[in-house]
Amino acid sequence: MRRSRAAPGDGRAGTGRTIGALGLAYALGSAATAGVALAYFAGFLAGVVPRSVDTGPSVRWAQAVGRDVAVLALFGLQHSVMARSTVKRALARVVPPALERSTYVLLSALGLALVMWQWRPIPALVWRVDTPLGVLLMRALLVAGVLVVLAASRAIEAFGLLGLPQAYAAYRGERTPAARFVTPGPYRVVRHPIQAGTLVVLWATPVMTAGHLLLAGVFTVYVLIALRYEERDLVRAFGAEYAAYRERVPALVPRPGRRAR
């Protein structure tokens, strides 16, 4: 059986309003921008791209902290506010409903790009793993986190998260089917595997600087807060079915013997 799961907070079917080729190109461009931003962010954390969490223009630590917290707060505000149902309804008055998800994806990707562009390193060392085995373990954890995110995204049809099926259906003049609640793959182990994998990626580093710690810490707090609102939206969308699932399956950390049926 083909399985699908709603995008966070969205249990509605598409409206069936059509869009033209330009709208479809907009959706494809938004998805491509998000893919590039997320791939670069993984490299940004791992330090394998020219501009990373520990490289870039050097400023005094107080200025770096202020600037970094400001761009993180801006990203979190944009990401959270646009995820709310009231904002989605308001946005639907400005852009076609089929492109609402694409717009959210595009602005979130640009917000993440802004964080990386404006980030200022804080090089004070918090910890450093020097043994080859320890470095290998940290790198393996980072790769594992990325793989969990990819597997979880694929399990719930990542193109849907990027807004492509909604846009393509509207381009063809069809309605997007209403989301069904199912628990494929990693969702049988934890309720939020994408966020769990992201947290592993944030923290799995052999060299933890104060700047990296600030980024990982703020993002972790943001994820934990955002999950409370996402859970509320999912209960509202799927009712007792999701509430029962929440009782059976942990949110982020797997527990032996606790899986969705």
Image (tube, rainbow, N blue to C red):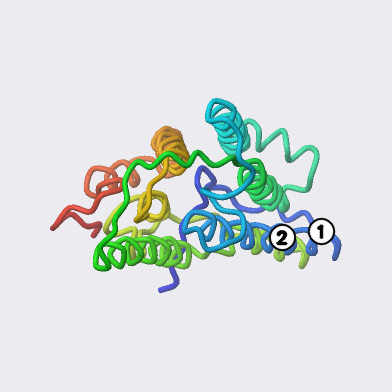
Q: Is residue 231 visible?
A: no
| CA distance for labels 1 and 2 | 7 Å
* Residue 202, horizontal then vertical, whole percent: 41, 50
SS at badge 1: helix
Pick the front one: 252 or 133: 133
Quadrant showing the C terminus: bottom left
Q: Would residue 234 appear left or right of 17 to someone viewing this image? A: left
Q: Which amino acid does label 1 sit on?
A: Gly
Q: Would residue 144 appear left or right of 105 to someone viewing this image? A: left
Name the residue carrying label 2: 167
Quadrant showing the N terminus: bottom left
CB under 8 Å between callouts 1 and 2?
A: yes
* Residue in the image at 52% along x and 63% along y: 48
* Residue in the image at 43% along x and 60% along y: 149
* Residue 130, horizontal then vertical, whole percent: 29, 59
Name the residue carrying label 1: 23
Please report whichever mark, 1 or 2, sits nearer to the chain's N-terminal start.
1
Pick the front one: 215 or 59: 59
Pick the front one: 184 or 173: 184
* Residue 236, horizontal then vertical, whole percent: 44, 36
Rendered position, 52 above or below 156: above
Q: Which amino acid does label 2 sit on?
A: Ala
Q: Would residue 90 appear left or right of 84 to someone viewing this image? A: right
* Residue in the image at 78% along x and 37% along y: 93
**Badge 1: residue crowd in 10 Å (few <14, some 14–19, many ≥20):** many
Q: In which quarter of the image is residue 167?
A: bottom right
* Residue 163, horizontal then vertical, whole percent: 64, 57
